[in-house]
Structure formats: structure tokens, C-alpha cells
Amino acid sequence: MRIVGGQFRSRNILYPLNQKITRPTKDVVREGVFNALHFDIKGATVLDLFAGSGSMGLEALSRGAKFVYFIDNNQEAIRIIKQNIQKLDENNDSLVMNCDYTVAINKFINEKISFDIIILDPPYKLTVIDEIVETVLNNNILKEDGIIVIETDYAIQLEDKRFKQNKNYKYGRTLVTIRRK
């Protein structure tokens, strides 16, 4: 797997080989997402929830994000993310947390940390998108004009009036939903 754009373009990154651990986002999907976020990524604070290999957050750093929080509850995934961050020398622009998404979200609520962009790519079998989006919106974890990027294998029905812009993209079996607050 490689970074598809920005300052680290074409640099190879590691990913867990066991697909039970993570399902890395394909290059074409990452390229499409970050082309859609082109004008929003520079200087952004990004949350890569369910980070897996960290490919989405690393892509954000490559394209000019100011800081990325990588969250995953799998020790092997965390090890790979840390290796990738070290390889790209992005230790000062990132924080890796080995915890469940609920623990991370509660930490952000308690510490009043908010994000310009939140990337949600949970395992497809988990049905937590609605719960996470509601918590994020109700607790100001997403900044005004912030963006949520959701990757799933099913259509998202987020018709929340707090979002002023909604876009959907399809890449084979993968569906990407981008919502702007």
C-alpha cells in the first residue's frame, strides 16, 4: 500500500496482513476522498477513528493536515500505525491511542477537543455510525463547518439538519459519505 498524494506521495506504508484485524482503504478510495477534501485538509485537525493501518490519517498528514489523532483498539494495528508514523517522521504531528472508540470520544468530550475532519471507517459489521455521529454533534467534537467522512458497505441515511452539505461516492462495494456541518 502507498500514499497516493501530497508530500509523501508514492511512499509505501505498512498494513496488517490479517484482514480480520483491518480492511485497508484502497488507493482509489483514498484518492477520491482526499480530492473531495482538497480545500479543507490543509491545516486541519483530523480524527482517524477505527484507524486500522492509519492510511487515511497518513494521507491527511501527507496533504497538509496540521495534526491527526489515530484511534484503534487492536494492538497489531497500533504497532503498524506507529511504524508508519515513524517511517514518515510525523511523530510531532500525530497522537496514537490504543483504545475503544467510546473511550476516545469520552476523552475528547472531557478535554474539549474538537476536529475539522472526522474519518469514520468502522468494521463493516459494526453498526455504530448513527451513535457516533449523534455523540459527535451533540458534544461539539466536530467544529463548525467540520466534515465527517464515513466509509461503509451500505448506504448511510444521515438526513440531519445540522449538515448543510451531503455527498456520496461509490467505489465498487465501498460507499463513502461526506457530510459538512
Image: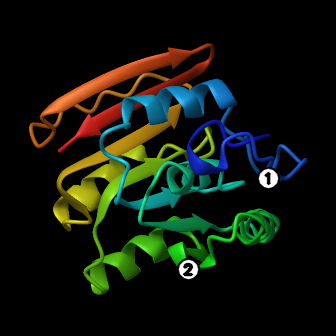
Point out residue 3 in the picture as x, y percentages from the top left corner.
68, 43
Kindly identify which residue carries mark 1: 21
Mark closer to the chain start, 2 or 1: 1
Residue positioned 43% across, 22% down in the render: 155
Figure quadrant of residue 157? top left
What type is the residue that disc 1 sits on?
Answer: Ile
Point out residue 166 in the picture as x, y percentages from the top left corner.
24, 27
140 shown above or below 163: below
Mark in the foreground, 2 or 1: 2
Quadrant placement of the N terminus: top right
Left or right: 109, with 21 as reference point: left
| Circle 2 SS class | helix
Kindly identify which residue carries mark 2: 92
- The CA distance from mark 2 to mark 1 is 26 Å
| Circle 1 SS class | loop
Residue positioned 61% across, 56% down in the render: 51
